[in-house]
Amino acid sequence: MKLSNKGRYGVRAIFDIAFHSHGEATQIKEISERQAIPPRFLEQIFQDLKRAGIVNSKRGPRGGYALAKAPDEITLGDVIRALEGDIIIGETEEDAVDEHAPSRAVTQSVFEELSEKITACFDAITFEDLCARGEEQGVRRRPPRRYVYSI
């Protein structure tokens, strides 16, 4: 199984927001620069993530994208399914319909079990886990923004 660029970039983008945003909205430009992801591609990715309820968007000078839930409530599996669909190894049920090859059911059941186990692995890792790993590996966080208000 290999994730597409869309899936890998989506995971990196959500990690970036979880790790660097301090609960604030983050602009595509910032994520694009930190993660080396083309901004136009990020826009497409964030539209899918927004539809899936993983991120919210905010317009305006302090706008951008923010997580719709806490990082410990979003899993790798959530992001992968939003961008790639269900994790399926082997054939789909439509492909498996073949009355001339009943032995196909044996291998198909193994592929289904593997798909379930891989899905469980993705669902066991939260973005809070990734943030902790980033801390352990010495990734430097962006400091919180300080806004100066003039009256």
Image (cartoon, grey):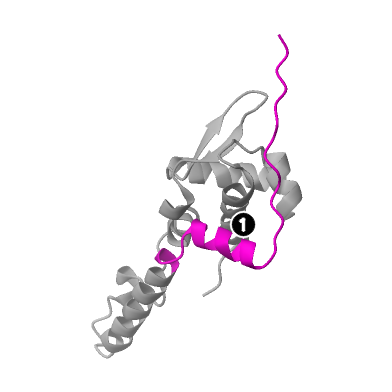
- Number of labels in the image equals 1
The residue sitting at 44% across, 61% down in the picture is 77
Nearer-the-camera pick, 70 or 123 = 70
- Asked if one can make out residue 99 in the rendered structure from this viewpoint, the answer is yes
Region in magenta: 122-151
Residue marked by disc 1 = 12
The residue sitting at 26% across, 84% down in the picture is 105
Given the image, on which type of amino acid does mark 1 rest? Arg
The residue sitting at 70% across, 60% down in the picture is 139
Residue 7 falls in image quadrant: bottom right
In the figure, is residue 101 to the left or right of 54?
A: left
Indicate the position of residue 44 as horizontal and vertical percent values.
59, 44
Q: Residue furthest top?
A: 151
- Asked if one can make out residue 88 in the rendered structure from this viewpoint, the answer is no
Main secondary structure found in the magenta portion:
loop
Q: Is residue 131 magenta?
A: yes
In the figure, is residue 61 to the left or right of 106?
A: right
Indicate the position of residue 95 as horizontal and vertical percent values.
34, 73
Indicate the position of residue 78 as horizontal and vertical percent values.
43, 56
Figure quadrant of the C terminus: top right
Callout 1: few (<14), some (14-19), or many (20+) C-alpha neighbours within 10 Å? some
Q: Is residue 68 magenta?
A: no
Numbered disc 1: secondary structure: helix
In the figure, is residue 123 to the left or right of 103?
A: right
Nearer-the-camera pick, 116 or 20 = 20
